[in-house]
Amino acid sequence: MKAAAFDYIRADNLEHALDVLAEQGADAKLIAGGMSLVPMMAMRLARPALLVDINRLDELKTQQREDGCVVMGAATRQRDVEFDTALHALLPLVRDGLKWVGHVQTRNRGTIGGSLVHADPSAEMPLAALVLDAKLRLRSKAGERSLPASEFFLGPMFTDVGETECLVAIEWPVWSGPGVFTAFEEVAMRHGDFAMASAACQLQLDADGTCQRAAFGLGGVDGTPLAFPDLAQKLVGKKIDSKLAQDIAHAAANSASPGSDMHADGEFRRHLARVLLSRMLVQAGSGQRLAQAA
């Protein structure tokens, strides 16, 4: 199919984009990489009357350290993060998740913020944001507000972004100190396809291998990605063996509400989530991947 007719404006700067959004409201849609929006327009699942192009706004492509976080502009290319070795040490889980995002061609164009705003429940960046408890900065002509990822994702492809708001930056928390280990994996029909289930975790271990801090989550098994801070707390003060990992993964998967489709039914997705999460907890808990954060 082809997209319905639409008008197009290239924003000169962020204020220009916000002016257009304030004037046009729900009729306007922001576009940067277009890796999610353009296919939806082609299938006429999205029919904006006006596209506001923010692709060339350098003010939305910056990265800086700020109060224990990396503040990343929403229009930052996925490829730029994928190949930034300095960011790898600070945000190892984001690095691991990006390896599963689409294909090289889509990561060359796609943006970090675009993936978050698209809010596919099986996508990798929303899962990483929820696990790390990232904060998202939204701006409109009325001002700026910040909200945690747990409040940002409201349902499948549905977020708390208002009609006149633009996601301008993501605050990614940096786990400081040694012994930060991560793991991220998913199962799909083919690499690059939508995940039937995914699991991600980030742990901080002491020199003896005892867990000092933990965060993990599941994707593709509910209307939004899921994080489990209460269950993660049960890992603190313990060495993560196979039995503990299986028990925690079982509890997490049982709290999900996966749907069924032509590729897998809900119970199979829950089984995948349980197996993947158990595997990721064991992998990270054994120190198979290390990232030293400054």
Image: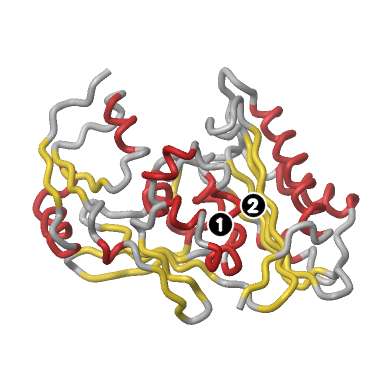
- Vertical relation: 281 (above or below) 261: below
Q: Is residue 49 left or right of residue 55?
A: left
Query: What residue appears at the point 16 percent right and 57 percent down from the top-left corner?
Result: 17
The residue tagged 2 is 217
What is the three-letter code of the residue carrying label 1?
A: Val
Point out the frontmost of discs 1 and 2: 1
> Which quarter of the rendered picture does the N terminus lie within?
top left
- Vertical relation: 273 (above or below) 188: below
Q: Counting other residues with Cα less than 10 Å from the Cα at mark 2, is it few (<14), some (14-19), or many (20 or more)?
A: many
Nearest the camera: 158 or 80? 80
- Secondary structure under badge 2? strand
Q: Counting other residues with Cα less than 10 Å from the Cα at mark 1, is it few (<14), some (14-19), or many (20 or more)?
A: many
**Image position, residue 235 (x, y; %):** 79, 64
Query: What residue appears at the point 86 percent right and 69 percent down from the top-left corner?
Result: 209
- CA distance for labels 1 and 2: 13 Å
The residue tagged 1 is 94
- How many circles with numbers are drawn on the protein? 2
Q: Earlier in the sequence, mark 1 or mark 2?
A: 1
**Image position, residue 197 (x, y; %):** 63, 37
